[in-house]
C-alpha cells in the first residue's frame, strides 16, 4: 500500500478527532513520529490530561519516538499490519519509553 503525504496528514487529523479521554488516563506525554519514505515526515502527538493535539515537525521533550516507513505506519493503523509483529520484524522502532508505546496503540487504532 503506497500512502501519500496527504494520507499521513489525514491520519493525524483523525487520531485527534477520535480521541477518547477515558482511554488516556495517566498518560501525559509527547510522542514523536519519524516516518520515512516518499510520504514520510516528522509528526508529533501530545496527550495532556484529557486532551490530545497533533502537529507536524519536531516536538520538544518527546518521551518516545516511533520510527517507521509511512506505508508501514498507515498499514498498522488500518489493521493490515499487526503492531507487535511489525515491531518484532524491525519495521517499527521505538526509542525512549517502550511502555508508552503499548498504551498508545489503543488510542491510535480506535
Image: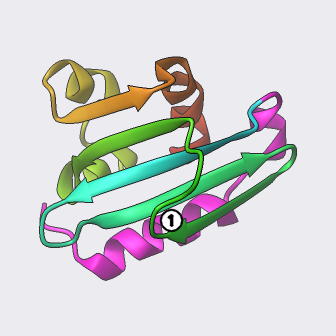
Q: Secondary structure at mark 1?
A: helix
Task: Give the left or right position of residue 20, taking residue 16 as reference.
Answer: right
- When asked about the image quadrant of residue 39, the answer is bottom left
Please determine whether, in this image, residue 73 is positioned above or below residue 94.
Answer: below
Q: Is residue 52 magenta?
A: no
| Extreme-bottom residue of the structure | 6
The image's colouring method is rainbow
Position in image of residue 55 (x %, y %) = 55, 70
Residue range of the region highlighted in magenta in the rendering: 1-26
**As rendered, which of 56 and 7 lies closer to the eye?**
56
Q: Residues within 10 Å of mark 1 (few under 14, many from 20)?
A: some
Query: In the displayed structure, does residue 23 sit left or right of residue 105?
Result: right
> At 22% from the left edge and 29% from the top edge, which residue is drawn?
86
Would residue 16 be found to the left or right of residue 48 on screen?
Answer: left
The dominant secondary structure in magenta is helix
Which residue of the protein is positioned furthest toward the front in this rendering? 60
Q: Quadrant of residue 63 in the image?
A: top right
Q: Residue at x 24, y 66 (%)?
A: 40
Q: Is 38 placed above or below 24 here? A: below
Amino acid at each position: 500500500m503506497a500512502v501519500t503525504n496527504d494520507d499521513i496528514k489525514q491520519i493525524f487529523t483523525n487520531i485527534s478527532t477520535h480521541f477518547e479521554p477515558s482511554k488516556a488516563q495517566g498518560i501525559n506525554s509527547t510522542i514523536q513520529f519519524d516516518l520515512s519514505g516518499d510520504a514520510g515526515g516528522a509528526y508529533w502527538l501530545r496527550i495532556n490530561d484529557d486532551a490530545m493535539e497533533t502537529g507536524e515537525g519536531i516536538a520538544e521533550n518527546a518521551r518516545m519516538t516511533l520510527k517507521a516507513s509511512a506505508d508501514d505506519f498507515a498499514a498498522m493503523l488500518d489493521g493490515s499490519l499487526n503492531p507487535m509483529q511489525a515491531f518484532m520484524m524491525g519495521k517499527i522502532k521505538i526509542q525512549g519509553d517502550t511502555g508508552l508505546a503499548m498504551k498508545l496503540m489503543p488510542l491510535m487504532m480506535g
